[in-house]
Amino acid sequence: MTLFNLDPFSCNDMETLQEWVSLLQQMVVNLQGMDKSSHKIGDLLYRVNEKQGEQIALLKEQNELMKARLKQYEVAFSAEHFNDVRRLN
């Protein structure tokens, strides 16, 4: 039988109660460590997400600039082609 199956209020053995308290204190320390670690992981994920958002925004801006440049090339080449055809006639 483990300590977790016992009722601390019905236990009259002082050694068992001290063992119980020791285990509970150890669990509290472990939970505090897990809480601290989860906050660190959350902060790290937030920073990574923020950085990725900035990178996505920069890529979108670069994509828009490339589209604008492509349109300029299309206009330039179509005008050049039109002028070449006019010269041939």
Image: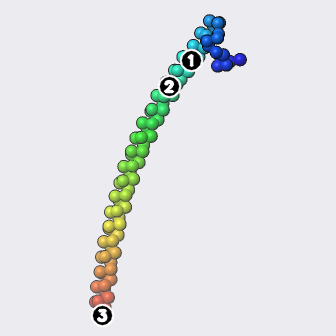
Which of the image's four quarters has the N terminus? top right
Q: Which residue is mark 1?
A: 24
Q: Nearer the viewer, residue 34 or 70?
A: 34
Amino acid type, label 3: Asn
Give neighbour class at mark 2: few <14, some 14-19, many 20+ (Cα, 10 Å): few
**Residue at image coords 36%, 49%:** 54
Mark 2 and mark 3: Cα distance apart in space: 83 Å
In 3D space, how far apart are the residues under numbered discs 3 and 1 (Cα atoms)?
96 Å
Q: How far apart are labels 2 and 1 at the CA level?
A: 14 Å
Give the number of callouts.
Answer: 3
Q: Residue at x 57, y 13 (%)?
A: 21
Q: Quadrant of residue 42?
A: top left
Percent of width and height locating residue 57: 36, 53
Res. 89 mark: 3
Of discs 2 and 3, which sits in the foreground? 2
As shown in the figure, which amino acid type bears the numbered disc 2?
Gly
Instruction: Say which element carries label 1.
Output: helix
Q: Which numbered disc flags the more N-terminal residue, 3 or 1?
A: 1
| Residue under the point 34% across and 75% down | 74
